[in-house]
Image: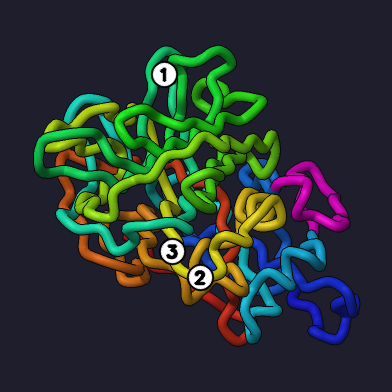
Amino acid sequence: MQGKIAQVPATLAALTPLQRAGNKPRFVLWERIDMKNFNLPTKAVAKGARSGANEAGLFWLRAPIVRALPAGCAMLAVWALAGNAAAAGVFNGSDARLSVNSSEPTDEPIAMSAWFKTADTDHRQVIASISLGTAAGATHSFELAAAGNDPGDPVQARARMNVPGDAETTTGYTSNNWHHAFCVFVSNTSRFVWIDGDSVDEDTLSRSVSTTINRTNIGAIDDRGTVGAWFNGKLAEVAIWAGSGVESMSTTEAELLAAGVRPNLLAGFTGNVVLYQPLRAGANEPDKVGPTLTNTNVTFDQSDHPRVIYPARQHYHRAQLQ
């Protein structure tokens, strides 16, 4: 049953849950939800009530999550994306990537974020990169990667001027599970990385990446014309921020993004988004930010996508994804 807005506690906002209608998700305030197909991170949930065999119930978002969203987005919709309601980008580990022969950010501060899922815990796989794709000489790049080649399988933020400077999370990712990766390149002597909003690490080696970097890739890196470190698995909600203020992004933003806040709705940093690719049902969707990327062999699995918080539209929102 649909409730009244007046019933929302002063410090919390109502969670708009998912009501399945065939394969098309529908968002309606205060509907009951099937919790079997709904996995909201505990950091985002303030309280909830469950009842019935299907664990239907109402949930509330924690106030910090609400404050992280721009004005006018107090009422929220959470995109559970169960069944085949949407897709994630599938990268085959050998020749699949999204790319463009340009790079808007060419210097720190830069931040990168993505949801990723992979069964490969043996190889280093680049999630997103900005690099020098032309000319001979040293490798220059900023990279967010799943470093399965390192002990513990950490998420890695790499600033490379031939020799890399790596920040690596203190805990690692696990096979075939969705994880959130986030990193901030503050300056040439400071870079941070998080996994699932936690396990932060900082690297302080001096690495002055060339401002002539000119390639942007999702799922690989273009190192002076040679593409490698291919990602093998699924990626979604990929974003890059740049410009003044990005250096202040910290554990607060890492936790909010890992709780499902959509990258281009992160309050205080909406104007810094230079690339956003949701990868729900294809590349270069209408709500993308930044350049149009060339899709090379990336497919879309219509059964898997991480949870994402979206603003509701006048208490009702319908997403047409297919």
The CA distance from mark 1 to mark 2 is 36 Å
Residue behind mark 2: 244
Side of 26 relative to 76 (left or right): left
- Is residue 232 depicted above or below 190 in this figure? above
Q: What stretch of residues is rendered in magenta? A: 41-58
Instruction: Please name the residue that numbered disc 1 is placed on.
Output: 120
9, above or below 165, in the image: below
Decide which of tag 1 and tag 3 comes sooner along the chain. 1
Looking at the rendered structure, the secondary structure element under dot 2 is loop
Give the secondary structure at mark 3: strand
210 in relation to 207, above or below: below
Q: Secondary structure at mark 1?
A: loop
- Asked if marks 1 and 2 touch (Cβ < 8 Å), the reply is no
Q: Nearer the viewer, mark 1 or mark 2?
A: 2
Q: Nearer the viewer, residue 278 or 220?
A: 220
The kind of residue tagged 2 is Ser
